[in-house]
Each structure stands twice: as structure tokens, then as C-alpha cells.
Amino acid sequence: MSDSKPFDLDAYFRRIGWEGERRADPATLRGVHLAHMRAIPFENLDALRRTAPSLDPADLMAKLVHSRRGGYCYEHNSLFARALRALGFRVTLLTARVVVGADGITSRPRTHMALLVDVPGEPRPYLADVGFGAIGALLEPVPLVAGVEFDDAGRRHRLVHAPHDGPLDLWVLEAHDRQKGDWAAQYAFTVEPFERPDFDVVNWYVGTHPRSPFTQRLYAQHLGADRHLLLDGRLLTETRTDGTVTEREVTGEAEVRRLLDEEFGISAPDHALTAGAPGSP
């Protein structure tokens, strides 16, 4: 299959509940980004079975738009990039090193997909990312400018430069930690373009490798208007917009399935909750 089939914006907008303008402008970019984040959950059910999810455009539509499923970064941002291009934006695919909990900025490989979006008439491109499965994720795109704090739908982010040996600036996305009162690095990237075949490779690695965190345990998140819900293995964490955090252990597959269905909007296939199940690579 190829990318030649026109993107079905109507179906995509129904999925995310977007009824606003269809213009290539900053307001539409921010609005569609936030709507996508709140409508389509993050989940790794395919990778949990050590199966790399398809990045074919038709398969992405079938799974993320026409089904009660979500996906991880390559799926979300591949879909979002196609929607933005259909709206008239120019989109560059980027790779990033996730540095949450890392020893250093360059201690991890480039396994995350993010997007650089050019907006007609705007002096700087925007960093957009609807596929980062963490509490520090962007809710709305931010201009690619260093040292400026942005309030994106209630979260605070900034971009800074980090020293490194390469010829391009190394950008780091930081999120403000309300509880600790400081800034936490989320991921680091440079702005050279990557193409879909590059992500076919890293998607296969992240979705099938026995040491990939996504093949080890269930990981799902859902963003609501007043809370962020994360299921990491059997630990359910709810973070309210006022910063209040509550946690509890989830026991039993039946309860996990109920939570995925009722709280995350995910219909889990049969036998989808067992890591490294028989038949996996």
C-alpha cells in the first residue's frame, strides 16, 4: 500500500471531535493537536505481543480512527502528519532520544518520532507531538525557539539547547514538574528530516525486541479535560489538572480490561494483555 490515497479528513475529525476551522494556521494547529490528544489513547497492545504495528496509512486509519484503539508514537504522529498535510501544513518527521530517567542527553538511541510543522506566514516552525506517552507530553505545539516558556493547555514547556559534538543544534524539550517545582528533560532532537523507511526500522525494533520497554508490560494513557490517566503495568496513576496525584494497584485481567474499555476507550483484543505471548517473534 502507499500514501497516494487522499486522507479522509472527515473521518479523522469525527474521531477527534474537531468541528473548528480547516485552515493551515496556528489556531487550527493547536486545536487539532489538543483534540487528537484527548480523543485517541496511547497504548502498546501490539508491541506487548511483540508485533510491530503497521504504519501503512490504511492500517492507521482502520486502527486509530475507525476502531476503539490507540497506538504509540509512530502510529499517532504518522497519522497526525497526514492530517496536517491534508490541511496544508508542511511537516518534517524528526527522531528524538527519550531522556526521562536517563543518565545523559545522548545515553539513549533515537527511538521517538516527533514532528516539525511549518505554518504559512509564521517566522518559525512548531514542534508538534501527539504520540509521547508521558505526563510531560506537549498538549499543544510550541514554536521552535529556545528559552521561552509556553503554557500549552495548562502544562508548561520550554525548549533549550544542549551542548553536543554534532553540526546541528541539539534541542531538548523540558516540562515543568509542578510537584517538584523544577524543569525535567523529556527528549532531545535535532531537526534533520527522517523518512518513513527510517521509522519502519525503529518501529520494528521497539515493537519486537525483548528488551524494549513496550514489549515488557502494558502501557496506556488517556488525557481528559481535567485529568491524565496512566496505566503502567498494573499501576494506575491519575494526575489532576491541579497537580493532585493518586495511585492504586490494579489486580486481575478482568479489571484491566474494564479500565481499558471504560476509562481509556480501548477495546483490547483477546489475549492482548500477555507480554511476549506464544507466536511472537
Image (cartoon, rainbow, N blue to C red):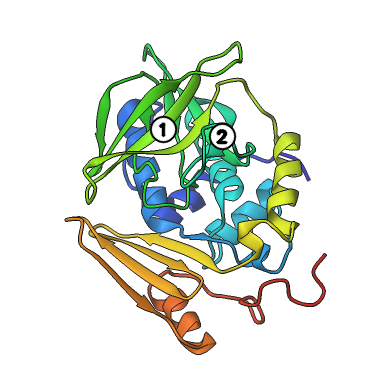
Q: Which residue is mark 1?
A: 173
Q: Residue at x 43, y 52 (%)?
A: 134
**Mark 2, other Cα within 10 Å: few <14 / some 14–19 / many ≥20:** many
Q: Residue at x 56, y 47 (%)?
A: 73
Quarter of the view holding residue 229: bottom left
Residue 49 in sight from this viewpoint: yes
Circle 2: residue type? Ala
Instruction: Name the secondary structure under disc 2.
Output: strand
Residue 22 in sight from this viewpoint: no
Q: Residue at x 36, y 15 (%)?
A: 122
Tell me where residue 1 appears, x and y as whole percent: 78, 46
**Residue 96 - label:** 2
Q: Quadrant of the C terminus?
A: bottom right
Tell me where residue 237 appears, x and y as whole percent: 35, 67
Tell me where residue 55 appears, x and y as whole percent: 69, 48
**Mark 1, other Cα within 10 Å: few <14 / some 14–19 / many ≥20:** many
Q: Nearer the viewer, residue 55 or 73?
A: 73
Tell me where residue 117 appears, x and y as whole percent: 47, 26
